[in-house]
Image (cartoon, grey):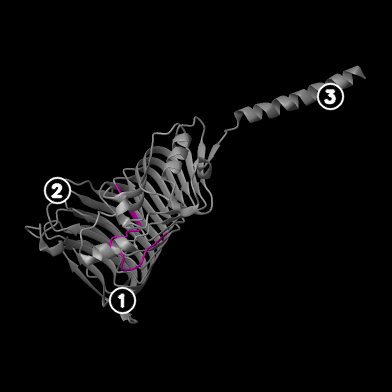
C-alpha cells in the first residue's frame, strides 16, 4: 500500500515538473497599451508623446513586445519610431491614427509615421487618416507648400510584415519601403481620390526581397512605384485603379543609379487606371538598368496604356540634352495579359535609340479597344512574340 502511494506521488511530481519546465521555456510577450501611457482616443488630443513612450518601453524590452492601440481615433504629429530594438516588436492597431488637420504641422520632414533602423517588426491592422485634402488644395493653388508627408515610411527595416492596414488620404505616398530587406506587405487598402497629386500607393526603392500581395490600391498616382536598387520584388493578387498603374521608374534621373532586377507581377486586375504595367526612364545619360521582369496573368479593364515602355520621359523638356536614355532594359516578359484598352493603342514600346530594349518576350496577349483589336507601336526594340497576339505584335 505504501509503495502504491509513493509511486502515485512520484508520477504527479514528474507531471508537475514537466509543466513547470514547459512554462519556463515559453516565450513571454510583453504588451504595452498606448492608453496606459496617456494616449487619448478622441482624435483631438495630441497623443504623440504617449505613443513614443510606449515605443521606447517595447523597443527596450528584453522579450518580444506588442504595442496595442485600442479602438478610437488618435492624433499624431511626426513620429519617429527608431531602433535598434532588443527583440521583435509588434504594432497592433485596432484604432485610427489621425494626422493634424493643419498640414503645415508636419513641416518639411517628408514623413508622418516613420519606422527607422528596426529588425523584426510587425505592423498590423487599423487605419491611417492622412488628412491630405488641404495639402492637395495648396499644391493645386500654386502657393508655396511644404514638401508633403508620406503616411507610413520604413527606412532600414529588415524582416518586416505590414498587414491589414487601411490608409486613406495621404498627403503624398501611403507606404514607402526604403533600404529594407525581407519585407511582406499583405492585405492592405490604400485609398485617395483620383485627382490627388503624388499619392502613390506603395513606393519601393533600394530594397531586396519584398513581397506585396492581396492588396487594393486606389490612388491619384502610381498604385505601386519601383525605384532604383530594387531586387527580388514579388507582387501578386492586387487590384489597381484608379491610379497610374504599376510603374518601374521613373529611373535614370541621375547618371549613377543602381538597377532594378528580378521583378514579378502576377494575378493582377487594373480598372480604369491611366497605365497598366509601365517602365519609365528619363531621356538622359545613366548607368542604370531594368532586367528579368515578368508581367503575367493580368486583366485590364478600360486602361489607357495597358502595356508601355517610355524611355523619353522629360518633364517640360528640361535637362535632357540628347533626348536619349542610358537605362538598359532587357529580358522583360509579358504573358497572358487580357482585357480592354481605353485608347486605340494598347501596347507602346518607345525604347531608347542609344540603348534599345532587348530580349522582350510577348506571349498570349489579347487587348481590345471598343470590342475590336487594339493597335501597337514599337521603337528600338528586339524580342520575340508567340501565341495569341491581339494587337498584332510589332516586335
| Residue 53 x, y percent position in the rendering | 45, 38
- Number of numbered tags placed on the structure image: 3
For residue 304, side relative to residue 190 (left or right) = left
Question: From the viewer's perspective, is residue 369 above or below residue 361?
Answer: below
Q: What residue is drawn where x is 47% and y is 35%?
A: 57
CA gap between label 3 and label 2 equals 80 Å
- Residue 389 visible from this viewpoint: yes
User: Principal SS element in the magenta part?
Assistant: loop
For residue 223, side relative to residue 120 (left or right) = left
The C terminus lies in quadrant: bottom left
| Residue 96 x, y percent position in the rendering | 47, 54
- Residue 126 visible from this viewpoint: no
Query: Tag 2, which secondary structure?
Result: loop
Q: Who comes first in sequence, dot 3 or dot 2?
A: 3
Residue 46 or residue 364, whichever sits in front: 46
CA gap between label 1 and label 2 equals 35 Å
Identify the residue at the far top of this view: 2
Question: From the viewer's perspective, is residue 335 above or below residue 9?
Answer: below
Residue beneath disc 3: 8
CA gap between label 1 and label 3 equals 80 Å
Q: Who comes first in sequence, dot 1 or dot 2?
A: 2
Residue beneath disc 1: 342
Residue beneath disc 2: 255
Q: Are marks 1 and 3 in contact (CB under 8 Å)?
A: no
Q: Which residues are magenta?
A: 190-205
Query: Tag 3, which secondary structure?
Result: helix
Query: Tag 1, which secondary structure?
Result: loop
| Residue 259 x, y percent position in the rendering | 24, 48
Identify the residue at the far front of this view: 45
| Residue 8 x, y percent position in the rendering | 84, 24
Amino acid at each position: 500500500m505504501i509503495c502504491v502511494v509513493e509511486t502515485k506521488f512520484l508520477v504527479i511530481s514528474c507531471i508537475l515538473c514537466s509543466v513547470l519546465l514547459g512554462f519556463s521555456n515559453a516565450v513571454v510577450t510583453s504588451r504595452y497599451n498606448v492608453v496606459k501611457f496617456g494616449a487619448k482616443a478622441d482624435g483631438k488630443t495630441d497623443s504623440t508623446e504617449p505613443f513614443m513612450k510606449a515605443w521606447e518601453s517595447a523597443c527596450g524590452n528584453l522579450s518580444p513586445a506588442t504595442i496595442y492601440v485600442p479602438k478610437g481615433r488618435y492624433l499624431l504629429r511626426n513620429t519617429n519610431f527608431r531602433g535598434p530594438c532588443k527583440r521583435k516588436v509588434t504594432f497592433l492597431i485596432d484604432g485610427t491614427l489621425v494626422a493634424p488637420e493643419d498640414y503645415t504641422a508636419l513641416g518639411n520632414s517628408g514623413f508622418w509615421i516613420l519606422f527607422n533602423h528596426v529588425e523584426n517588426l510587425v505592423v498590423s491592422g487599423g487605419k491611417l487618416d492622412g488628412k491630405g485634402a488641404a495639402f492637395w488644395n495648396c499644391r493645386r493653388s500654386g502657393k508655396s507648400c511644404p514638401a508633403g508627408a508620406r503616411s507610413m515610411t520604413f527606412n532600414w527595416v529588415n524582416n518586416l510584415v505590414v498587414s491589414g492596414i487601411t490608409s486613406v488620404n495621404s498627403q503624398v505616398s501611403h507606404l514607402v519601403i526604403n533600404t529594407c530587406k525581407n519585407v511582406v506587405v499583405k492585405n492592405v487598402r490604400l485609398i485617395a481620390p483620383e485627382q490627388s497629386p503624388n499619392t502613390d500607393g506603395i513606393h519601393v526603392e533600394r530594397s531586396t526581397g519584398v513581397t506585396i500581395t492581396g492588396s487594393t490600391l486606389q490612388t491619384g498616382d502610381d498604385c505601386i512605384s519601383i525605384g532604383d536598387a530594387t531586387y527580388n520584388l514579388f507582387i501578386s493578387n492586387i487590384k489597381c485603379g484608379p491610379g497610374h498603374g504599376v510603374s518601374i521608374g521613373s529611373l535614370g534621373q541621375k547618371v549613377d543609379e543602381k538597377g532594378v532586377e528580378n521583378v514579378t507581377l502576377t494575378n493582377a486586375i487594373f480598372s480604369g487606371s491611366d497605365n497598366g504595367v509601365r517602365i519609365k526612364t528619363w531621356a538622359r545619360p545613366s548607368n542604370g538598368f531594368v532586367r528579368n521582369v515578368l508581367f503575367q496573368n493580368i486583366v485590364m479593364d478600360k486602361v489607357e496604356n495597358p502595356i508601355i515602355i517610355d524611355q523619353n520621359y522629360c518633364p517640360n523638356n528640361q535637362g535632357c540634352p540628347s533626348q536619349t536614355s542610358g537605362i538598359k532594359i532587357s529580358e522583360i516578359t509579358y504573358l497572358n495579359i487580357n482585357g480592354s484598352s481605353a485608347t486605340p493603342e494598347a501596347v507602346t514600346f518607345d525604347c531608347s535609340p542609344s540603348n534599345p530594349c532587348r530580349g522582350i518576350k510577348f506571349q498570349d496577349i489579347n487587348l481590345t479597344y471598343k470590342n475590336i483589336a487594339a493597335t501597337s507601336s514599337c521603337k528600338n526594340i528586339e524580342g520575340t512574340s508567340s501565341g495569341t497576339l491581339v494587337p498584332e505584335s510589332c516586335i
